[in-house]
Image (spheres, rainbow, N blue to C red):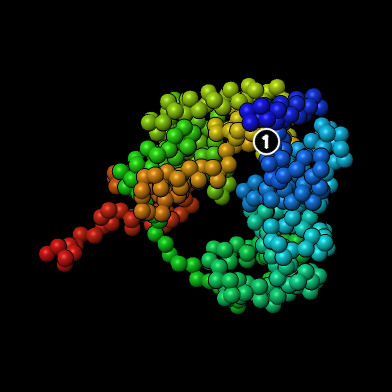
């Protein structure tokens, strides 16, 4: 068995060396090797006898909501395996491998909306909407087209058709109010900004009522129990989320230049609503953050060997400073383990850690700490605000640290204090 394993390892090592020979970057070559090994184990039989159907089925099986590029990477990996290494015909085109996540959608039917969807993406980017917002709105458009059986846009662009779909979401699908509002925003943007349709009468559809929720907050002891279950980079990220009141994506998008050790502050750039702010850097995690920056710099030095390995820079800044993406101050504090492709430009670069990995680590830590509360990464931010209030911090100061536009948003934390302004005693204690 050991001899067979060595033979297999030797085969994939040769494939890896072939990738380097034809110019594939080392981190990308490692991921290609991993994908091809995964493909080899996905079914029995020699690689040379695998059918196109098996290759396509494998690539489609990798599709995940949190990793939209994995299918394309698998296609390229198998293409190099068969065309460059095994000298066999390349795998089918990418159009055969990419499926819509909604299985009811028909690729051929969606092609009729190509012109409108292209205009939609253009309008979103002209207005500098976030990529995730664009993807979310586009997903709702595809669902909307599917709901109306892929009828021409001219037939489903009336307020009546839009109300029918939104009423369906509220009454039949029982979606959350925030979900319905997101769908509404996407449809209104498409029909008003792209199609030029006036939606002034868009008022009488059934709207789901959004309930008022109090945030879940941990005690200091529970925070310590949670942090004790985390190791390495996840312990540091959770500590900064709690110690500085950051949102998860704000923390993962931190650049080297955003951390000021002398002033003990963290600069949050382009946060929620496109706003910048400054928050505190907790003393407790300064040493760990220094170590993390050293690891990030080691990765950066390795990436400098590959001219295409640059971090994402906002397009306007990239035009003004074309080499900024390859400079140390612009690197991410928490870089990803592998290079990835930019979904807009298609260029390879070093992105930050994916949020799902942190979320999974926190979920596992909650289970290990045996906490009965619903704990997520955002719970650490809620706990930050509440514990500051308990220590007597000014509500306006907390508002600035959290980046809230209105102090009324921050005031909600006064309702989850241990003693939220209640001076009366319970009759059970008389």
Viewer-side residue, 185 vs 249:
249
Q: Position of residue 325 (x, y in %)?
A: 67, 30
How many dots with numbers? Answer: 1
Q: Position of residue 268 (x, y in %)?
A: 52, 39
Compared across the picture, whether 315 is left or right of 175 comes to: right
Residue 35 visible in the picture: no
Q: In what quadrant of the picture does the C terminus appear?
A: bottom left
Establish if 302 lies above or below 81. above
Q: Secondary structure at mark 1?
A: helix
Establish if 139 lies above or below 277. below
Viewer-side residue, 67 vs 379:
67
Q: How many other residues sit within 10 Å of disc 1, few (<14), some (14-19) or many (≥20)?
A: some
Residue at the location (70% across, 75% down)? 161
Residue located farthest toward the left when viewing the structure as drawn = 430
Q: Position of residue 276 (x, y in %)?
A: 53, 42
Residue at the location (48% across, 25% down)? 291
Name the residue tied to disc 1.
Answer: 34
Compared across the picture, whether 61 is left or right of 250 comes to: right
Residue at the location (81% across, 64% down)? 109
Residue at the location (33% across, 45% down)? 222
Compared across the picture, whether 91 is left or right of 60 comes to: right
Residue 87 visible in the picture: yes
The quarter holding residue 203 reads: bottom right
Q: Position of residue 7 (x, y in %)?
A: 70, 28
Q: In what quadrant of the picture does the N terminus appear?
A: top right
């Amino acid at each position: 068995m050991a001899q067979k394993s060595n033979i297999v390892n030797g085969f994939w090592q040769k494939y890896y060396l072939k990738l380097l020979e034809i110019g594939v970057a080392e981190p990308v070559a490692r991921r290609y090797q991993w994908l091809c090994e995964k493909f080899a184990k996905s079914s029995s039989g020699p690689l040379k006898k695998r059918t196109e159907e098996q290759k396509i089925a494998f690539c489609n099986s990798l599709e995940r909501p949190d990793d939209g590029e994995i299918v394309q990477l698998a296609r390229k990996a198998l293409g190099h395996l068969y065309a460059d290494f095994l000298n066999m015909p390349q795998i089918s085109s990418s159009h055969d491998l990419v499926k819509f996540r909604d299985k009811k959608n028909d690729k051929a039917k969606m092609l009729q909306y190509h012109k409108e969807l292209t205009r939609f993406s253009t309008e979103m980017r002209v207005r500098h909407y976030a990529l995730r917002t664009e993807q979310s709105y586009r997903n709702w458009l595809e669902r909307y087209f599917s709901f109306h059986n892929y009828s021409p846009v001219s037939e489903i662009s009336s307020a009546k058709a839009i109300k029918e779909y939104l009423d369906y979401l509220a009454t039949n699908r029982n979606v959350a109010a925030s979900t319905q509002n997101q769908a509404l925003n996407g449809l209104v943007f498409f029909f008003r900004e792209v199609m030029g349709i006036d939606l002034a009468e868009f008022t009488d559809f059934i709207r789901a009522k959004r309930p008022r929720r109090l945030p879940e907050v941990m005690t200091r002891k529970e925070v310590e129990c949670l942090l004790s279950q985390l190791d390495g980079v996840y312990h540091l990220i959770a500590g900064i989320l709690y110690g500085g009141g950051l949102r998860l994506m704000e923390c993962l998008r931190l650049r080297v230049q955003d951390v000021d050790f002398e002033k003990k502050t963290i600069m949050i750039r382009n946060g929620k609503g496109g706003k910048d702010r400054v928050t505190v850097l907790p003393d407790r995690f300064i040493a760990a953050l220094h170590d993390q920056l050293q690891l990030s710099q080691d990765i950066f030095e390795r990436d400098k060997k590959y001219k295409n390995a640059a971090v994402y820079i906002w397009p306007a800044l990239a035009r003004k400073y074309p080499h900024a993406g390859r400079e140390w101050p612009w690197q991410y504090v928490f870089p990803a383990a592998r290079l990835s492709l930019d979904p807009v430009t298609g260029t390879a670069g070093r992105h930050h850690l994916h949020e799902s990995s942190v979320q999974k680590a926190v979920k596992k830590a909650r289970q290990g700490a045996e906490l009965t509360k619903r704990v997520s990464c955002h719970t650490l931010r809620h706990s930050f605000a509440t514990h500051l209030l308990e220590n007597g911090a000014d509500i306006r100061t907390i508002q600035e640290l959290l980046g809230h536009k209105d102090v009324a948003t921050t005031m909600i934390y006064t309702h989850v204090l241990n003693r939220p302004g209640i001076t009366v005693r319970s009759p059970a204690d008389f």
